[in-house]
Image (cartoon, helix red, strand yellow):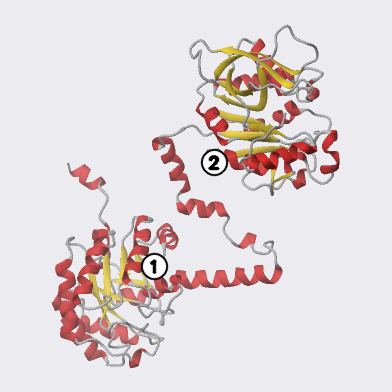
Amino acid sequence: MNALLETRPVRKTTQLRRLLESPHTEFILEAHNGLSARIAEEAGFKGIWASGLALSAQFGVRDNNEASWTQVVDMLEFMSDATTIPILLDGDTGYGNFNNLRRLVQKLEQRGIAGVCIEDKLFPKTNSFIAGERQPLADVDEFCGKIRAGKDAQSDPDFCLVARVEALIAGWGLDEALRRAEAYHEAGADAILIHSKLPRPDEVLAFAERWAGRSPLVIVPTKYYSTPVEVFREAGISLVIWANHLIRAAARAMQEVAREIHDTASLLNVEDRIVPVEEIFRLQGADELAEAEKRYFAGRSRHTKAVILGASRGGAELASLTEEYPKVMLPVAGKPLLQRLVETFKQHQVNDLAVVTGYRADRVQVSGVQRIENPAFSEHGELASLACARGAFGDDLVVSYGDLLIRSYILGDLLDSDAPLTIVADTELPRPDSADWRDLVWFEPERAVPWGHQARLTAVQNRMVEQPPEAPSGRWIGMLRAQNQGVAWIETALAALERRADFATLGLPDLLAWILDQGHPVRVQRIHGHWLDVNRAEDLLRAADFAHGLPAEWR
């Protein structure tokens, strides 16, 4: 039982109380949002100061209670969720009277905030470093009532309320500061924060000497920052708050980078001075989400990758259109053909995409894809391009021609297949006079599913070189999916076919034919229309209609 209690996480409220009551001087750092809070914790700090100045600054407003207390609490929730260490809120004056403070304490506890510090000024407050000597202070008895109300409102006995004394800031002197601190201590404050804006710690040290450890003492050495911390330790200071340094550091860095980018119209001079985007992902917890998806995602649990073949320039009928761009970058209704295909994949959460480029590879500019260049594209066929992408294979792989337009459901159905290897074939054959008699397939219904749209592939042929004894069942559209064993079949087929002298001339149908010859089953997902590819200039016109959702009479 004792071992179980020792491994149970310590509540954040208890952590903060231990910091305040520690026999050693402890230190906490300002943070103002979830990212800065996580950075503070990773730096090794045991607690966070949710600074009123920093929180208002990150909202872009003044430190005059211009940000509502509910906006502050909402931000605190993000900060608490991002960290495991306690947060002490700079609660200004408590955002109103005793009743406002009661509700604030309740809401802070609900969001896992360990404590609140309130100052004895009037609402709405002004930052202590802006004409602090002219700012009126709250009535002592009224402020004591506010403290008692806050303590009565808490449900966690370790929730901490720190009373901040502003008498030195306002110029009222040491005696008044001590009088107020004693009253606040008697009213139930868990600690006293004594504040000063002098560049030396003399006032604070004099207060600490006369306070004599009656309760934990907190300081904010923003103005007397050059004081060695040993001085604070010798004075018996319980907690030192570095109160606004992350927001100030962030502002300086952002100003410098913003000016540099504006003045040079380039990122070259700043990229090495800022963290890579991967570090932001890490701080956001992207890896944890990826692991959680493996455990909890109710949809497809496997990580699907896709390889898109886009190395060729295009046929002779497209020559005038592909002088500057490869076929896959030709515009279709305002978007490159390849971008439309990529967007279809991403609609189905297939985000790990690789495109094999070749002709005018520098012009293949589509975001969200990995580019793999086939330097010998002019001598190679599509099978050699697929071989270039071996490093992008995974246990779940979709391979597609790069000039395809499909209705989204086709890919969705393909991703639902549980077969090791599945291809998509259209049962509507080209017209007899069409030039599209290629990638022909023969199939028969699977015994387990004599109805529906699934069948078993029996033969595949790249082009109709002679009239076969049996009419083809359909045409392969240029898209397949392999899983686990099916990926192994593809890799084995590539290795075998690479030994052939004619490997450079082979296409994907040759790959499928080799797999069939080994006796491996290939499922066919049957469709009837709802796709097209681009091989001629007139195909681009039909593709535009298709992209706009219009029927495409393309055969």
- Taking 321 as reference, is 513 above or below it? above
- Taking 397 as reference, is 180 above or below it? below
Q: Nearer the viewer, residue 42 or 459?
A: 459
Instruction: Classify mark 1: residues with Cα within 10 Å, few (<14), some (14-19) or many (20+).
Output: many
Element on which disc 1 rests:
strand
Q: Nearer the viewer, residue 187 or 397?
A: 397
| Residue type at numbered disc 1 | Leu
Residue 448 in the figure: left or right of residue 261: left
Badge 1 vs badge 2, beta-carbon distance below 8 Å = no
Residue 387 in the figure: left or right of residue 55: right
Counting from the top left corner in percent of width and height, residue 536 is at 79, 35
Counting from the top left corner in percent of width and height, residue 218 is at 29, 75
To which quarter of the image does residue 465 belong?
top right
Kindly report the distance in space between the C-alpha atoms of the residues bearing marks 1 and 2: 42 Å
Counting from the top left corner in percent of width and height, residue 153 is at 16, 67
Residue 298 in the figure: left or right of residue 174: right
Can residue 235 be seen at all in this image of the molecule?
yes
To which quarter of the image does residue 392 belong?
top right
Counting from the top left corner in percent of width and height, residue 120 is at 25, 82
The residue beneath circle 1 is 29
- Give the number of marks: 2
Which residue is pictured at 58% across the width and 34% down the height? 305
- Taking 427 as reference, is 398 above or below it? below
Residue 239's mark?
A: none
Instruction: Classify mark 2: residues with Cα within 10 Å, few (<14), some (14-19) or many (20+).
Output: few
Element on which disc 2 rests:
helix
Quadrant where the N terminus is found in the figure: top left
Q: Which label's residue is closer to the chain start, 1 or 2?
A: 1
The residue beneath circle 2 is 347
| Residue type at numbered disc 2 | Gln
**The furthest residue to the top:** 469
